[in-house]
Amino acid sequence: MNMSSSHALWPEFIKAVQHEVAPALGCTEPISLALASAIAAQHLAKTPERIEAKVSANLMKNGMGVAVPGTGTVGLKIAAAVGALAGNPDGKLEVLKGLTQAQVDAGKAMIAEQRVELSIANVPHILYSEACVFHGEEWAKVRIADSHTRVIYIEHNGHVIFELADVGAATAAAAYDIASATAQDVYDFATLAPLEMIDFIDAAGVLNDALSQEGMKGTFGLHIGATLQRQIAAGLMSEGLLSQILIRTTAASDARMGGATLPAMSNSGSGNQGIAATMPVVVVAEHIQASKEQLTRALMMSHLMAIYIHSKLPKLSALCAVTTASMGAAAGVAWLLKGDFKTVSMAISSMIGDLSGMVCDGASNSCAMKVSTSAQSVYKSVLMAMDGVCVTGNEGIVAHDVDQSINNLGQLACQGMVQTDVQILQIMLHKQAK
């Protein structure tokens, strides 16, 4: 290891985690539109009477079937409506925190009266949301692009208030630069950085564990976590560490996708990715009675590794990114149980061989199924690695070097799955049209 070059990345790693790991209330795609609506309404300075919303095809895919917290309703129209009527324009990913029933009812009334229009925007941005709100002849428009809270344009009654000069600039590149990093660099940082530099990541465990406990009530989404827990009592599943990893991780996703009014600590713009990177680590740390420092370092390794792997992917794609976040969890769990980079890299390689074909067919309750599958792969891959076994460079897209395996996965998502993404959206829109 070149210690000097590794240390040079540490400030960028901190910026990356602080930028990509943040509390979010509700699935981040509809929340992005809600934020655009809230900011537009702020500039309108009057109660919106009508909304015209436009989103990119990928954002449409990820927002059309997911519950919006506090509303009891799915989809982008309700997000736009309640965002415009009651959203906090300064709330970022927590824009809808504290909705009242009266505000939700007013949003539903707007939709019922056909005062909310939604269409797909013909834009080059993979992630894009636009809200134009009207009151009489007055109007205000806000556009968000490339990340869920990145405002690129504000207009009021024909006057441009704000316009980002270089819209094409990647938001992540402006915030941090980890392009030269390797998985070994991530491992070294998580294990060697001063504890006071990284202990802010502990909040991920607190927030996502609370969401998991909420999901265990069995009232959200597909209540997979609660169902699996009941099957243990019925004798159809055995109690054990694998079961608890599956149950507690999936329960958090159940709550998240089912509209619970608790925030998730997100990763790379996704609450489910944040859950997938957090909960297996938390459960294993509890099981082995890890120290607070061990948990902190394992969470940092997981979340930063997830960011590193996701940096090779488009912001939204046909590849389910819960899988890549779970590869981060595998790194954290492998370190907790074995404590060496070789085990970490072997576990990640096996997961790439296992999960690389999982597609994203939009945010919905069924995301918790994908979270469950990925969490199972985490533990399976770690146990294999601890026994000296992994998917090797002789098989499929996996390479002998873990970083090359990660790059291969990124190429699959960036190039090979483009048509898959188009086909998924066509299927979903065809279903909606029926």
Image (cartoon, grey):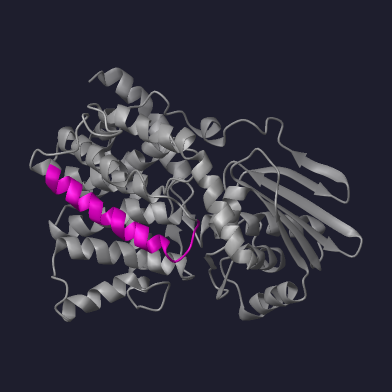
Left or right: 219 as drawn, with respect to 134: left
Q: Main secondary structure of the magenta part?
A: helix
Residue drawn at (14%, 41%) of the image: 385
Specify whether residue 316 is in view.
no
Which residue is nearer to you in this view: 352 or 291? 352
Quarter that holds the C terminus: bottom right
Locate residue 91: give its quadrant: bottom right
Q: Position of residue 10 (x, y in %)?
A: 36, 30
Residues 62 and 428: in front is 428
Q: Is residue 342 rendered magenta in the image?
A: no
Considering only vertical position in the picture, is 401 above or below 349? above
Picture coordinates of residue 420, whole percent (x, y): 49, 45
Q: Is residue 131 visible?
A: yes
- Asked if 154 appears above or below 215 in the picture, the reply is above
Where 411 falls versus 39 (above or below)? above
Q: How many marks?
A: 0
Residue span colored magenta: 362-384
Asked if residue 409 lies left or right of residue 64, the reply is left
Q: Residue furthest left?
A: 387
Residue 199: x, y in percent? 32, 46
In x, y percent, where is residue 355? 31, 47
Q: Residue at x 22, y 35 (%)?
A: 345
Which residue is more in the foreground, 150 or 311? 311
Q: Quadrant of the N terminus?
A: top left
372 part of magenta stretch: yes
Tell me what residue is drawn at x 81 percent, y 58 percent: 44
